[in-house]
Image (cartoon, helix red, strand yellow):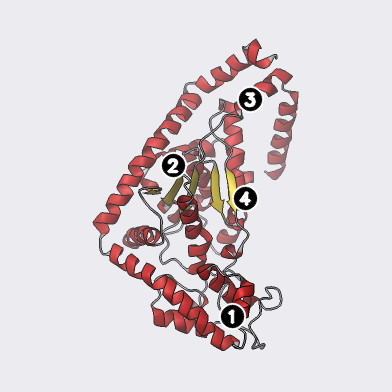
């Protein structure tokens, strides 16, 4: 199958090279269409959010929103069911995730906050995109390999969910997608599918760009193993700081955070990753540089410094925790927010989906491309 995939790529490559000069000029002109900047991102409703999620994803969305960007935030419940879910628990997690996003600063009036499954065109566009990709292309994506290793029977949804992810992005003609480094290859798939669709049916989608941050916010590590990212999947609950943790729990986790045998507080990520992780958390909450923090911590040993970090974390997270708990007591209010967000998302999605349907099933896009190649004023200048 891999040989077939490579042969097909080679054939397509030769076809592109064989296109007449006039066609290439038309194609280039088509791809220069100016699309309004739109940022799309999604989060799976898997339960309580930890500090890595907060800084690595949600905080970035809030920052982009507050800078005036058009931001769309999707509660990706369709993605969550690629593995078995209890319906009642999923429902609770959707509302908890919604409350968490709002409490963390996502403004549902300025941004579009909605539940993915409320807009059926995500799944519909996913099917069309599935029909223009290949099994070989999907099999090379790393997350499928990682997640399927532990499963005896691999659900098809787990295999094709990167295509659904591409549909999420392209349905709104998103131009930028904030992601971590581990998701970059999936965005490359979205870019590839946009190009393939545009080539086959005429210019429709912008090529989405990744917004990858390589700063400390993307490198929050486990408190128990600083060689690994902070994660919900870690079996030791003391490895992560959850936004809903009570102050005493946060203090206890930080007091038991692994450091090393050097008592001085220094920022040396390579030599002292555990201490550097604490300093990064401190820095992200306060805006101070690691150098400023180390200077302030002169005379403190790492045990004493942990208490300083705990005070900062508790001070910053406690108001967010209180807001989340208040919001979760109002499920009808959260449902209303999601419904209104879905209505706004549907309006954008319908425009795109109508265009896709016309091009795929009516041939309008192909006719447009033929018209372009036959228009001397465009193609033979």
- Closer to the camera: disc 3 or disc 1? 1
The answer to whether mark 1 and mark 4 are in CB contact below 8 A is no
Please name the residue that numbered disc 1 is placed on: 296
Q: Is residue 233 visible?
A: no
Q: Earlier in the sequence, mark 3 or mark 1?
A: 3
Q: Is residue 95 above or below residue 262?
A: above
Residue at which label 2 appears: 122
* Badge nearest the viewer, 3 or 4: 3
Residue 29: mark: 3
Whether 201 is drawn above or below 38: the answer is above
Please report the residue visible at 67 percent of the width from the left and 16 percent of the height from the top.
379
Badge 3: residue crowd in 10 Å (few <14, some 14–19, many ≥20): few
Q: Are marks 2 and 1 in contact (CB under 8 Å)?
A: no
Q: CA distance from mark 3 to mark 1?
A: 57 Å
Quick one: quadrant of the C terminus?
top right
- Residue for badge 4: 185
**Residue in the image at 61% along x and 74% along y:** 292
Q: Are marks 2 and 3 in contact (CB under 8 Å)?
A: no
Q: 10 Å neighbourhood of mark 2: few (<14), some, or many (≥20)? A: many
């Amino acid at each position: 199958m891999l040989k077939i995939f490579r042969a097909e790529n080679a054939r397509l490559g030769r076809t592109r090279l064989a296109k007449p000069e006039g066609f290439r000029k038309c194609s280039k002109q088509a791809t220069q269409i100016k699309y309004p900047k739109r940022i799309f991102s999604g989060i799976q409703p898997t339960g309580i959010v930890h500090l890595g999620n907060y800084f690595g994803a949600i905080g970035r969305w809030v920052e982009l929103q507050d800078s005036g960007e058009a931001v769309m935030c999707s509660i990706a419940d369709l993605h969550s069911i690629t593995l078995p879910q209890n319906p009642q628990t999923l429902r609770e997690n959707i509302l908890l995730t919604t409350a968490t996003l709002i409490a963390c600063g996502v403004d549902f009036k300025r941004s579009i906050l909605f539940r993915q499954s409320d807009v059926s065109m995500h799944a519909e566009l996913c099917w069309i995109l599935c029909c223009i990709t290949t099994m070989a292309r999907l099999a090379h994506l790393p997350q499928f390999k990682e997640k399927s290793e532990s499963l005896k029977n691999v659900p098809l949804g787990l295999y094709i969910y990167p295509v659904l992810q591409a549909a999420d992005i392209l349905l709104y003609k998103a131009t930028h997608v904030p992601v971590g480094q581990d998701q970059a290859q999936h965005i490359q798939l979205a870019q590839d599918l946009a190009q393939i669709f545009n080539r086959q049916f005429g210019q429709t989608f912008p090529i989405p760009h990744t917004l990858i941050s390589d700063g400390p916010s993307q490198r929050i590590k486990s408190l128990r193993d600083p060689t690994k990212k902070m994660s919900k999947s870690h079996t030791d609950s003391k490895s992560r700081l959850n936004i809903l943790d009570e102050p005493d729990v946060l203090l206890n986790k930080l007091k038991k955070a692994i450091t090393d045998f050097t008592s001085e507080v220094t920022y040396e990520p390579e030599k002292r990753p555990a201490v550097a992780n604490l300093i990064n958390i401190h820095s992200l909450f306060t805006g101070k540089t690691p150098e400023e923090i180390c200077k302030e911590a002169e005379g403190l040993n790492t045990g004493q410094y942990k208490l300083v970090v705990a005070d900062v974390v508790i001070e910053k997270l406690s108001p967010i925790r209180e807001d989340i708990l208040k919001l979760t007591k109002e499920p009808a209010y959260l449902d209303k927010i999601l419904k209104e967000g879905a209505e706004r998302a549907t309006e954008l999605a319908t425009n795109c989906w109508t265009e896709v349907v016309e091009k795929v099933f009516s041939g309008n896009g192909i006719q447009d491309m033929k018209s372009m190649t036959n228009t001397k004023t465009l193609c033979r200048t």
